[in-house]
C-alpha cells in the first residue's frame, strides 16, 4: 500500500519549572510515579490540573490547526490510512492538560488508559476496562471500538456545552454513570456490527449508515474543521500488549 500514517504532534514548549531544568522536571515526575499519593496529595494534583491553562507559545492554536490539517488531508488526498495522529511529549509536561483545553472548543471524547495502580492524573477512565478487555478475535475488537465511536457520538448529542460534556465523562464522581450508559449503547450497536460480514468495507458502511441516521450528519467535521475528537490518553498500552 502507498498509504502512510500522519506524523505526530509534539508539544515542544516546556514551561519553566521552579525546581530546575527540564531534566529535573522529568526526574521529579518519575519519582512521583514510583509512589502512591495519599488522599491529600491527590487533591493537590487534581487542583493543579484544574488550574488555568498557561499558553505563552500559542500551543493550543497550533494543535488545533494541526488536527484540522490532518482531517482535511485525510478526506481530500486519500494518502493516509485513517484520520488519527499522536500527541507526543515526555511525561508530566501537559499533554492531558492540552486535551482538556482543546475540549472547550472541540467536542472531545476523552479516555484514559492509565494503569489502575498508577498515581498519575487524570485517573483511568471507567470505560477503559471495556476497551482493553480480552477480545475473542480481531472482528470482536474492531466491532467493539466501532461501537464505542458510534455510542459516544450519539451520547454527545445530549449535551449542548462542550465543557459540560467533558466534565461529565472525566469527573471521578460522574463518569461511572456516564460510561455505563455508553457501554449499554455499545452493546446494542455491537450486535449489529457483529452480524455484518467481517470485511472492513462492510463494517465501515454500517457505521456510516449509523451516523447518517443522526440529526446532524456533520457531527465529526464541518467547514473543514474537526468538531469531534476521540482522545486516548496513556495509549502506549495499546502497543505494549502482545
Image (tube, grey):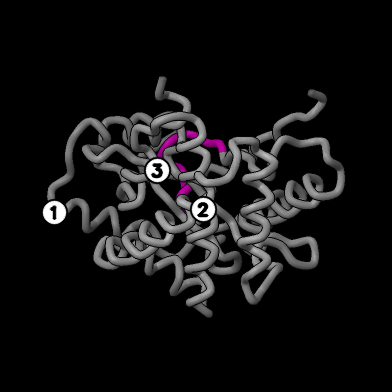
- Mark 2 and mark 3: Cα distance apart in space: 18 Å
If you read the primary sequence from the N terminus, does the residue marked by circle 3 or circle 1 appear first? 1
Residue 46 placement: quadrant = bottom left
Residue 142: in magenta span: no
- Quick one: label 2 or label 1, which is nearer the N terminus? 1
Task: Name the residue that disc number 1 marks.
Answer: 39
Residue 94 inside the magenta-drawn segment: yes
Return the residue at label 2.
Answer: 192
Residue 99 picture location, percent across and down: 51, 54
The correct choice, above or below, for 75 with respect to 20 in the image is: below
Can see residue 136? yes
Image: magenta residue range: 88-98
Left or right: 182 in relation to 149:
left
Image height of 218 relative to 198, above or below: below
On residue 131, the disc is: 3
Q: How many marks?
A: 3
Amino acid at each position: 500500500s502507498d498509504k502512510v500514517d500522519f506524523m505526530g504532534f509534539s508539544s515542544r514548549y516546556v514551561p519553566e519549572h521552579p525546581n530546575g531544568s527540564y531534566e529535573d522536571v522529568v526526574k521529579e515526575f518519575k519519582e512521583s510515579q514510583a509512589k502512591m499519593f495519599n488522599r491529600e496529595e491527590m487533591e493537590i494534583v487534581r487542583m493543579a490540573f484544574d488550574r488555568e491553562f498557561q499558553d505563552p507559545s500559542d500551543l493550543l492554536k497550533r494543535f488545533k490547526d494541526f488536527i484540522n490539517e490532518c482531517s482535511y488531508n485525510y478526506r481530500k488526498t486519500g494518502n493516509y490510512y485513517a484520520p488519527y495522529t499522536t500527541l507526543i511529549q515526555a511525561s508530566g509536561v501537559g499533554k492531558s492538560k492540552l486535551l482538556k483545553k482543546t475540549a472547550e472548543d472541540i467536542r472531545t471524547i476523552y479516555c484514559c488508559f492509565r494503569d489502575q495502580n498508577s498515581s498519575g492524573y487524570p485517573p483511568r477512565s471507567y470505560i477503559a476496562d471495556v476497551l482493553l478487555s480480552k477480545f475473542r478475535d480481531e472482528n470482536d475488537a474492531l466491532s467493539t471500538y466501532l461501537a464505542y465511536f458510534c455510542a459516544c457520538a450519539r451520547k454527545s448529542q445530549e449535551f449542548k456545552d462542550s465543557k459540560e460534556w467533558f466534565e461529565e465523562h472525566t469527573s471521578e464522581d460522574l463518569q461511572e454513570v456516564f460510561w455505563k450508559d455508553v457501554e449499554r449503547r455499545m452493546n446494542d450497536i455491537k450486535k449489529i456490527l457483529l452480524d455484518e460480514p467481517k470485511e472492513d468495507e462492510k463494517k465501515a458502511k454500517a457505521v456510516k449508515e449509523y451516523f447518517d441516521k443522526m440529526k446532524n450528519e456533520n457531527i465529526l467535521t464541518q467547514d473543514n474543521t474537526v468538531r469531534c475528537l476521540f482522545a486516548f490518553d496513556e495509549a502506549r498500552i495499546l502497543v505494549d500488549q502482545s
